[in-house]
Amino acid sequence: MINDWIKSCDAHDRAGIKVLKIMLSREPKWQKLAVLSQVIGASEEDTKELLLMAGARASAKEGESNLWGLISRNPA
């Protein structure tokens, strides 16, 4: 179901998701939202949506809400 939804995204969104997955698959496990946004050329709000579609989550640690990582690498 999620894969069907991702397929319906436009090419720009799919490209952004792909880049985000690559970045979050490398070290460090947690990446700053500002850097992720800059790399894909999207606003932080749009980047958050793409991160969720990519299977990522924000850090739950106090003071680290701007850090994001893949759920597969950073389970809750």
Image (spheres, rainbow, N blue to C red):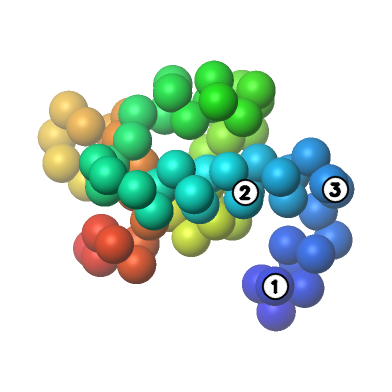
Q: Which mark is residue 10?
A: 3
Label number found at residue 70:
none
Q: Which of marks 1 and 3 precedes in the sequence?
A: 1
Determine whether, in the image, residue 63 is placed left or right of residue 45.
left
Q: Position of residue 17 (x, y in %)?
A: 62, 48
Q: Amino acid at mark 3?
A: Asp
Q: 11 and 49: which one is in front? A: 11
* Residue 8 placement: quadrant: bottom right
Circle 2 sits on which residue?
Answer: 17
| Element type at mark 2 | helix
In the image, is 73 to the left or to the right of 47?
A: left
Amino acid on which disc 2 is placed: Ile
Please, what is the three-letter code of the amino acid marked with disc 1? Asn
Crowd band around label 2 with a 10 angstrom C-alpha radius: few (<14), some (14–19), many (20+): many
User: How crowded is the residue under tag 1: few (<14 C-alpha within 10 Å), some, or many (20+)?
Assistant: few
| Residue located at (27% from left, 44% from top) | 27
Distance in Å between CA atoms under marks 3 and 1: 13 Å
Q: Which residue is mark 1?
A: 3
Is residue 21 shown to the viewer in this render? yes
- The answer to whether residue 75 is above or below residue 19 is below
Q: Which residue appears at 65% of the width and 23% of the height?
A: 41
The numbered mark, 2 or 3, whose residue comes first in the sequence reads: 3
